[in-house]
Image: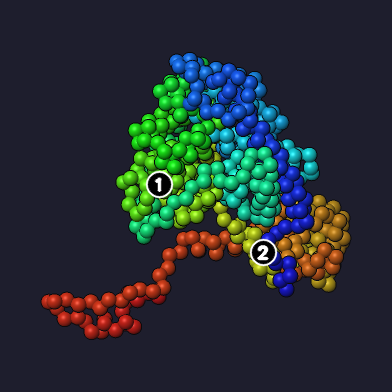
Amino acid sequence: MSEHRGDFATDVRLLRISAIAAVGGALSTVAADFLLHLIRFFTNLFFFQTLSTANHSPSLNTLGLLVVVIPVLGGILVGLIARFGSEQIRGHGIPEAIEAILFGKSKMSPKVAILKPLASAIAIGSGGPFGAEGPIIMTGGAIGSLVAQYFHLSSAERKALLVAGAVAGMTAVFGTPVASVLLAIELLLFELRPRSLLPVAIACAVAGFTRPLLLGSGPLFPLHTLPLGPIGLVASGIAGVIAGALSWGLSSGLYKIEDLFARLPIHWMWWPALGAIAVGIGGYFQPRTLGVGYDVIGDLLQNHLAVGVVVAIVLVKAVIWVIALASGTSGGVLAPLLMMGAGVGAIAGPYMPGGEPAVWPLIFMAAALGGMMRAPVMAAVFAFELTGDANALLPLLAAAAIAYGFTVLLMRRSILTEKVARRGFHIYREYSIDPLERHYVDEVMTRNVQTIDADMTVADVLRDYFGARQKYRAYPVVSAGTLVGMAERALIELIPAAQANARIGTFVSHARLEIALPRETCRSVAARLAITGLDRVPVVEDENTRRLLGIVSRHDLVKPSMSVFAEEHEMEQFRRVWIPRTTRFAPTNKREDVPGRRADVAR
């Protein structure tokens, strides 16, 4: 019978979690809108000395040399907020969310939900070369976690709501719901189950439908390019390698500079102000590198900037972004990566084969994102949703995949996981279906079980089953095929000697009994064995009749993993091309020319 075997393990609680996620998606959209207005407010306050939330680029400021001071003021404020508010606001958001998911039971404090957007708005509004997506991912995640903490939920369910809130915020900022779901799958969930995928998808859908009410609709950077020819695959591969090298260089440089900051003989509270000095100097020479820079990304994708200007933007942006982020201030990585990737594409575009130059800023942008974050599918779909350019989707995927492969081979960790690793936590991003989840107890249990009759005396049981030739730690005690209990040496030795002739069934029936059902997954039974410290548990038909069917031990639970080991490590070759051996100087051995007699035919 296989009625209990379904594609997924879930229950009606999924509906409750999904409903909460829908609310969280709407709240994250409101939070994203608030953050963007807050960034504009501080931008106008710092660079134009006005109280306004109008969308003005900091590159239009007329401060002259005073522009060097503005980022430093912002860095001082961010340092103070981190020092006396919450240190969790430091960083670019996604590593902090990953750490909370894997090592913090998906719990975030209300402080983070309030102080993270405030600190990020100050950092970006004062010219910090960051994006708003990292802070809103952290803020949305905090909102999802806080909402979840008001309900009686497990840590896994809180994780689903935290991630749902985080990627809903990303959807609201960029208008990329599908890419946001893929971000959750490739970076944040560390599993693929209905209990996590459905809440995330619903939250992103709600955010996508809510976004036009607050932030506008349509692609953020509308673009239409011509399809690439067949040579486009090779050209996309070249773009992927260049973008992968860019990702490797930026990530390596970031953490080397972070190590330099760690050697400074001053408190980390002052690091953001020191890093902001570089931001101010870079902003003085190239004002377009200040702030989020969505307008600059649009100009790069449309090829509206001269090559010399683009080179200056890429170099200055890379330097100030690496220094500022290494200083521990608050800001995101997506928008800077988009700008630098698109800039490299604009520079390389005229020399790339297989298509018009206009397409390469977009392709390089996606490749840089896929290589740096090691999320190639998300990067390709993200670039497509940002622009609506369907003609570029195939080269986007090819370039992002090549960049991803480049960084996987050359870098042990990504820019996101390196941050967490430096805090003492290792993250293994390869995950697959647990073999214990795929198999049920009735597939691995031992059916031929050595049992003890409930009418045997205690003395006989000790002599026959727990003597010098004892084979198992515990034995099922049965009466007419029905399980009465489990007999083990520690329990029997507690029985007074005066009752040595009493029935064993009398004593074991009062002890606590752990049982397994044939329709349970091996994983659930393995968890119980680990919690109770037992070596084996009896398998019964159901909890009422308790008819003994078999026994499942730790050894039995290893069986599913053996097939996985074989799949991973056993190398086999089933077909081989046979080429007759000939030589100009010696005759061929005719007996070896017969395929059935060759010694090297694959078995």
Q: Quadrant of the C terminus?
A: bottom left
User: Which residue is disc 1 drawn over?
Assistant: 358
Q: Residue at x 82, y 54 (%)?
A: 512
Residue 402 located left or right of residue 436: left
Dot 2 falls on a residue whose secondary structure is loop
In three-dimensional space, the C-alpha distance between marks 1 and 2, rounded to whole angstroms, equals 45 Å
Q: Secondary structure at mark 1?
A: helix
Q: Amino acid at mark 2?
A: Asp
Q: Nearer the viewer, residue 148 or 458?
A: 148
Residue in view at x 46 percent, y 64 percent: 570
**Viewer can see residue 103:** no
Query: Which is closer to the viewer, label 1 or label 2?
Result: 1
**In-front residue for pair 318/551:** 318
Which of pointers 1 and 2 lies earlier in the amino acid sequence? 2
Mark identifier at residue 119: none
Type of amino acid under label 1: Ala
Q: Counting other residues with Cα less than 10 Å from the Cα at mark 1, is it few (<14), some (14-19), or many (20 or more)? A: many
For image coordinates 70% across by 56% down, the residue present is 524
- On the image, numbered disc 2 is attached to which residue? 7
Q: Using a 10 Å C-alpha cutoff, classify the residue at mark 2 as few (fewer than 14 neighbours), some (14 to 19) or many (20 or more).
A: few
**Residue in the image at 52% along x and 60% along y:** 565
Q: Is residue 298 above or below residue 83?
A: below
From the viewer's perspective, is 288 left or right of 535? Answer: left
Q: Decide: is 497 above or below 105.
A: below
